[in-house]
Image (cartoon, rainbow, N blue to C red):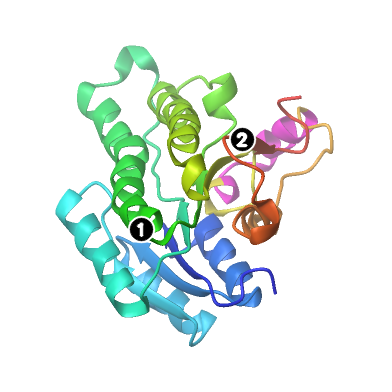
């Protein structure tokens, strides 16, 4: 059990990749706090995952809410070993038609939200001189995508943020890495037509979409003691698409 006795906070943990990471972490022995704006889904997921999963309503774009939730986790458990910055949104639109509000909302949640949660958790990790932070970026932060200028910019920002944090925290036994998923089987890809799915798969060397477990396995490793010499890395889980 890679994460026995660890306390992990996972943002966007109610569904999709976040819930998959939570499931894997519990299997590896961690206590997991699911932070999400969707209270109904978050409570249902926590109940499904069992006694080692807890839910907390968390809006990562709200600084006061972020600070209160992180403080509550520390007060309840006495430590925060792992942070997974997974929460994020899309609001796709061609750049010519993208409003400032379309742009800002995605930046506020995906990038600024990651900053707010990381800053809040860092304080406790620095005091305990230990921590594992993994940010969920995206391959579009590396290669871009038409209609996703806001989302691509937010994920590229997370990549730069990851490297800066890694350098700041390396001396405190805190590692900071990012996972950049490609096309992963979630509700978002389920909405695509079979024709579009097949077109995307042809661009992937392994000829399939990834699974949530593919991402969760890497997150578990990066969050463990075994990854103590890995920091500042951006690791693609994309079936070779960016290669």
Please give left or right for residue 199 compared with residue 111 in the image.
right
Badge 1 density bin: few <14, some 14–19, many ≥20, Cα 10 Å: few
Q: Is residue 139 left or right of residue 202?
A: left
Magenta segment: does it hold 6?
no
Is label 2 in a helix, a strand or a loop? Answer: loop
Residue corresponding to mark 1: 127
User: Which of 186/80 is in front?
Assistant: 80
Q: Is residue 192 magenta?
A: yes
First in sequence, mark 1 or 2: give its number: 1
Residue under the image location 67 percent in, 36 percent down: 236
Checking the image for residue 115, the label placed there is: none
Q: Nearer the viewer, residue 222 or 103?
A: 222
On the image, which quarter does residue 238 sit in? top right
- Which secondary structure is most common in the magenta stretch? helix
Residue sticking out furthest to the top: 96
Q: Quadrant of the N terminus?
A: bottom right
Residue 195 horizontal/vertical position (percent): 69, 36
**Image coordinates for residue 219, horizontal then vertical, percent:** 62, 54
Query: What residue would you read off at disc 2?
Result: 233
Quadrant in the rendering for residue 95 = top left
Helix, strand or loop under label 1:
helix
Tell me what residue is drawn at x 28 percent, y 75 percent: 75
Magenta stretch bounds = 189-202
Residue at position x 78%, y 43% from top? Answer: 208
Q: Are marks 1 and 2 in contact (CB under 8 Å)?
A: no
**Residue 72 x, y percent position in the rendering:** 26, 71
- Comparing labels 1 and 2, the label whose residue is closer to the camera: 1
């Amino acid at each position: 059990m890679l994460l026995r006795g660890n306390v992990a906070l996972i943002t966007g943990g109610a569904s999709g990749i976040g819930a998959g990471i939570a499931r894997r972490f519990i299997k590896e022995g961690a206590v997991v706090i699911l932070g999400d704006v969707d209270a109904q889904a978050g409570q249902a997921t926590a109940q499904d995952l069992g006694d080692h999963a807890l839910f907390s309503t968390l809006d990562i774009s709200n600084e006061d809410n972020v600070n209160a939730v992180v403080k509550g986790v520390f007060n309840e458990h006495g430590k925060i070993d792992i942070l997974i910055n997974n929460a994020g949104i899309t609001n796709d639109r061609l750049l010519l038609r993208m409003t400032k509000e379309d742009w800002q909302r995605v930046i506020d949640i995906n990038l600024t939200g990651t900053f707010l949660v990381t800053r809040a958790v860092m304080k406790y990790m620095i005091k305990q001189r230990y921590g594992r932070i993994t940010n969920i970026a995206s391959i579009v932060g590396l290669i871009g995508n038409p209609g996703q200028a806001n989302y691509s910019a937010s994920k590229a920002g997370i990549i730069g943020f990851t490297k800066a944090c890694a350098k700041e925290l390396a001396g405190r036994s805190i590692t900071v890495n990012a996972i950049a998923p490609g096309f992963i089987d979630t509700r978002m890809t389920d909405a695509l037509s079979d024709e579009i799915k097949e077109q995307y798969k042809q661009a992937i060397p392994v000829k399939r979409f990834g699974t949530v477990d593919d991402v969760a396995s890497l997150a578990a490793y990066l969050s463990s003691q075994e990854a103590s010499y890995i920091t500042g890395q951006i690791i693609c889980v994309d079936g070779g698409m960016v290669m």
